[in-house]
Image: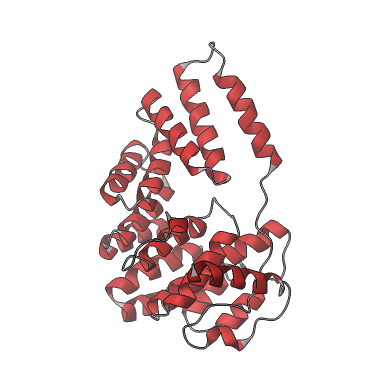
């Protein structure tokens, strides 16, 4: 209950500070996060709801083939996933695999859900299936790497994540995930390699600031302030907030600041950017934070 009260207080205060300057308070010690930028959660896109309705109608048709039916279950599952309806998404993905057992894209989704459920062996098998069926599928290496990372196999995670980075070595998100895995093996080497690789990254993208933060070139305060710069939409603002909160929380975990990490992970989830790995794995990170005590109902 205390955790829930603190989260509600965090959101209430954060919401009143939209567009305001974050202060140095967020950088001092381990305590609940309060003075940070925040915005209302992402709202459902009505076009997705209409697309789900159209797929429902199509699935009722007796004229579609088995392969078409599998594709529709996959598409509807992906739509359910994108609006946070994970149970319905899993049901559709299971139906799709029953109809089409060699459906690589569906194995990629089921692998993510196994990872979120901390069923790592099943997750590895799902991503192995993706790579066997579709070797050029870049994101299978990202997702298997993340599963290996959470499954306490950081050396293997680093290998997969480096394959993902090599496919686009200008992408800062890829570099950050390599760093997160590598620092579990050798923190000094991880930082050195991130510094060396930074020269290859696209510095014009917002994501490069995440790299600067991990390198110590950008403060927590400045990272949060920069989230609001050069925006093109409200959605982009929420996406950046989701990412910034997640990676700040990851750093708080590494610094042994669980209270701070907890609030940042909760703030990442409060954006409702369901498709992002940062949103998805914020929930898992919260479960891990509570692993030494009874997991609260809201994290189930």
Quick check: can you spot residue 201?
Answer: no
Q: Residue furthest front?
A: 1
Point 40% across, 32% down: residue: 94
Point 46% across, 73% down: residue: 261
Residue 118 on image: x %, y %: 33, 53
Point 49% across, 22% down: residue: 69
| Nearer to the camera, 106 or 20 | 20
| Nearer to the camera, 287 or 271 | 287
| Nearer to the camera, 78 or 195 | 78
Point 49% across, 84% down: residue: 216
User: In the image, 37: left or right of 131?
Assistant: right
Residue 31 on image: x %, y %: 50, 82
Give the vertical position of 149 relative to 97 (above or below): below
Question: In which image quadrant can residue 11 be found?
Answer: bottom right
Q: What colour scheme does the image use?
A: secondary structure
The count of marks equals 0
User: In the image, 185: left or right of 180?
Assistant: left
Residue 25 on image: x %, y %: 58, 87
| Nearer to the camera, 286 or 65 | 286
Question: In which image quadrant can residue 103 be found?
Answer: top left
Quick check: can you spot residue 161?
Answer: yes
Give the vertical position of 126 relative to 280 (above or below): above
Residue 139 on image: x %, y %: 43, 49
């Amino acid at each position: 209950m205390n955790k829930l009260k603190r989260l509600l207080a965090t959101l209430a205060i954060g919401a009143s500070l939209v567009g305001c300057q974050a202060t140095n308070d967020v950088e001092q010690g381990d305590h609940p996060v309060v003075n940070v930028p925040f915005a209302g959660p992402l709202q459902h896109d009505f076009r997705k709801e209409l697309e789900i309705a159209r797929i429902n109608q199509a699935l009722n048709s007796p004229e579609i083939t088995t392969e078409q039916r599998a594709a529709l279950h996959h598409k509807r599952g992906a739509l359910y996933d994108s609006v946070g309806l994970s149970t319905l998404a899993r049901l559709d993905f299971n139906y799709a695999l029953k109809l089409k057992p060699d459906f690589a894209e569906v194995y990629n989704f089921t692998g993510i859900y196994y990872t979120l459920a901390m069923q790592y062996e099943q997750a590895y098998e799902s991503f192995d299936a993706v790579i066997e069926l579709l070797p050029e599928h870049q994101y299978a290496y990202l997702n298997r790497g993340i599963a290996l990372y959470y499954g306490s196999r950081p050396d293997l995670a680093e290998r997969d994540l480096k394959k993902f980075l090599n496919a686009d070595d200008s992408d800062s998100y890829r570099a950050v995930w390599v760093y997160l895995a590598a620092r579990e093996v050798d923190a000094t080497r991880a930082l050195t390699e991130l510094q060396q690789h930074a020269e290859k990254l696209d510095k014009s993208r917002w994501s490069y600031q995440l790299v600067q933060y991990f390198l110590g070139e950008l403060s927590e305060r400045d990272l949060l302030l920069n989230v609001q710069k050069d925006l093109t939409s409200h959605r982009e603002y929420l996406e950046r907030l989701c990412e910034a909160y997640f990676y700040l929380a990851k750093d708080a975990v590494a610094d042994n600041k669980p209270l701070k990490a907890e609030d940042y992970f909760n703030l990442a989830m409060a954006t409702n950017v369901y498709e992002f790995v940062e949103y998805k794995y914020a929930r898992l990170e919260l479960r891990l934070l509570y692993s030494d005590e009874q997991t609260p109902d809201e994290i189930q």
